[in-house]
Image (cartoon, rainbow, N blue to C red):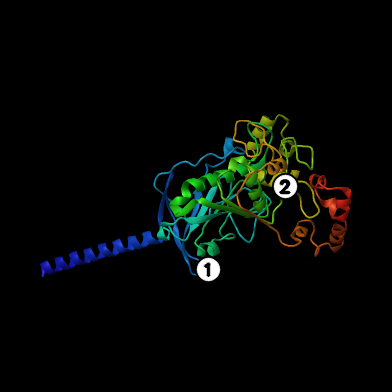
Amino acid sequence: GKSVATMETAVNVFTLFCFLQLWFVSLASENPEVTLSTGRVQGQKLVSAANRTYYSFLGIPYAQPPIGYFRFKAPRPPKSWNGTLEAFHIPPACSQPWRVVEFPERYSEDCLYVNVFTPYLKPPQDKPMPVMVWIHGGKDYQGSGTPYKYGPDFLVTADVIVVTFNYRLGIFGYLNTNSKSAQGNAAAKDKVALLRWVQKEISHFGGDPKFVTIFGGSSGGQDVNCLYISPMAKGLFHRAISQSSAYCGMTYHITAEGSYLENVNPGLRLAERLGCSSSDPEEAVAFLRNITAQVLAERQQDVFIPGLRESTNPFLVSVEEDHGEEIFMSRPPEEALRTSQSTVPYILGFNNAEGKMDVVQPEVNPTQFSEFEKHIASYLPKNILENFSKTEIDKI
């Protein structure tokens, strides 16, 4: 009797051990791990709308948090971590003024994170998969790379790795005071940092670092155009798709001294409105660094340029002078385009008459919309009209 009971206990313990082993193996298969240069990452096994299995890795840091002294400055490489990073949760969106109510999100300055979606961790026939990096729109002051809005379901079905990410927005990403503290284009440099991260790490997800396509819509498409002509981004991507965008600088180009719309630096103007008594750029930036992110995100709208439908964000890509950081844009984009020798395949696309929606809404004010159609040339930026004769403008 006693020996039989002991044997039954041993069998039960062994059975339980085997069950736990199988359970842990099953759990591991559902939550695969990848080893990056900065540490291990655990993702999730998911199923797409087309019933296709893929692997999701959310919220991997591609740069250090741009907080404190590093607000407004170029991104720094990510730090390594101990243990395994659980990449299960959507990272916070970067600080911004308006809330996208249909896609509720958290907001933070600590927002430089990347999401990777891959159909395989070990590709069939060991052939690395093409990679598509999505740059979200939002007029460069709102939005995020959340998979709630930009999911990978369609592209992973085509055996493509999808990468989405957050980058700094508005004043946090584009303040340029022509000084060491705010050289400019921090958000553009975030995008370069992300592409460098892709080159370094995407092979661990089964991706081909030599087959990277960048694509974006609206202001994200404009960012594609800017990356296309920036020497800083050379060699980091191999195809480009710009959807429904303005040309880099054609509409939103500003300089350190001010925007083409107003001969004043919007950052210095905002500092003054918030109570800064100094016009010195370094002191103004130090003042702005001490404003809380939430207040700065909201109050930046005080210096937006008034428009018919909504105000225009003046914090965008600008020409930089050398203050110790790597330069993203050293001369006006129009000049860079004229001398560009890029051979990267490039697609640019628009929908018919889509620009009307950003000028005035006909359903809100049909009279104003009719006036817009009659006098469309008067709504165009001066730096566009300079390229046309009076006869050509009259035809518009």
Quadrant for residue 351, please give it: bottom right
Q: Nearer the viewer, residue 126 or 29?
A: 126
In this view, the mark in front (1 or 2): 1
Give the image location of residue 329, x and y in percent. Answer: 66, 39
Give the image location of residue 373, x and y in percent. Answer: 85, 59
Q: Which residue is mark 1?
A: 49
Q: Which residue is mark 2?
A: 313
Q: Nearer the viewer, residue 199 or 183?
A: 199
Q: CA distance from mark 1 to mark 2?
A: 36 Å
Report whether 328 appears left or right of 357: left
Q: For the residue carrying disc 1, how many other residues have a C-alpha within 10 Å: few (<14), some (14-19), or many (20+)? A: few
Q: Secondary structure at mark 1?
A: loop
Q: Amino acid at mark 1?
A: Ala
Quadrant of the drawing holding the N terminus: bottom left
- 329 is higher (above) or lower (below) than 99: above
Q: For the residue carrying disc 2, how many other residues have a C-alpha within 10 Å: few (<14), some (14-19), or many (20+)? A: some
